[in-house]
Amino acid sequence: MTDSIQQSEKNSLTGRLKELLTDISPFIDNASEDQKQKLLSVLDDLRKTNRRKHDRKPCSITVNYSTWGDAFKGLVKDISAGGMFILSIETDMAFSVGQEITVNFPTQTKKQEPIELPGKVVWTVPKGIGVKFKAKDQNLDAIMESL
């Protein structure tokens, strides 16, 4: 199949999906609560499936993080091999998408050095940030297994 035919089919599929989303609006308006919940669940699962490469685990881990020479304390609410969500505890500072950040995790024993990982902010909400790790760390795997 040529590239122009493949592109045309892709555009046709995209156009049809957009048209379908417009056509489904009256259904949503008249749907029962049960139908709305089922549709919401399917769409939410689809969105989650396409957003993440790694499954996230809910947790509650205290973490120190720093950026631009400022240090903060936060609470990791979920974590994966690829990133985490940090709930801000001590700051109302506005973080920017793309901002470089370093996170420090306490280790299981006091004898070990904290785990330090570089990352970047990939999304923000008023009281927290989504962080994507820049590198994989074996120590992080151990933390993930202990959750």
Image (cartoon, rainbow, N blue to C red):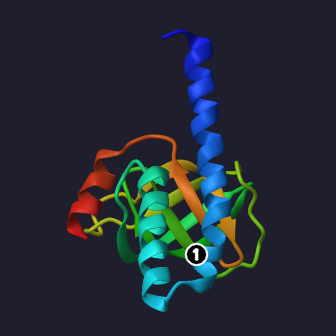
- The answer to whether residue 138 is above or below residue 66 is above
Work out whether 117 lies above or below 147: above
Count of picture labels: 1
Residue 49 placement (x, y as % from top left): 41, 55
User: Looking at the image, which residue is at 65% across and 71% down?
Assistant: 25
The answer to whether one can see residue 62 in this image is: no
Would residue 27 appear left or right of 96 to someone viewing this image? left
Q: Residue at x 54, y 70 (%)?
A: 86
Side (left or right) of 107 relative to 70: left
Other residues around mark 1 within 10 Å, as few (<14) / some (14–19) / many (≥20): few
Q: Is residue 6 visible?
A: yes
Disc 1 on helix, strand or loop?
A: helix
In this rendering, would 21 be left or right of 97? left
Q: Is residue 53 above or below residue 79?
A: above
Quarter of the view holding residue 71: bottom right
Q: Which residue, given by chain and number where applicable, does mark 1 sit on?
A: 27
Judging depth in this view, the residue of 89 and 104 nearest the camera is 89
Q: Residue 55 lies in what quarter of the image?
A: bottom left
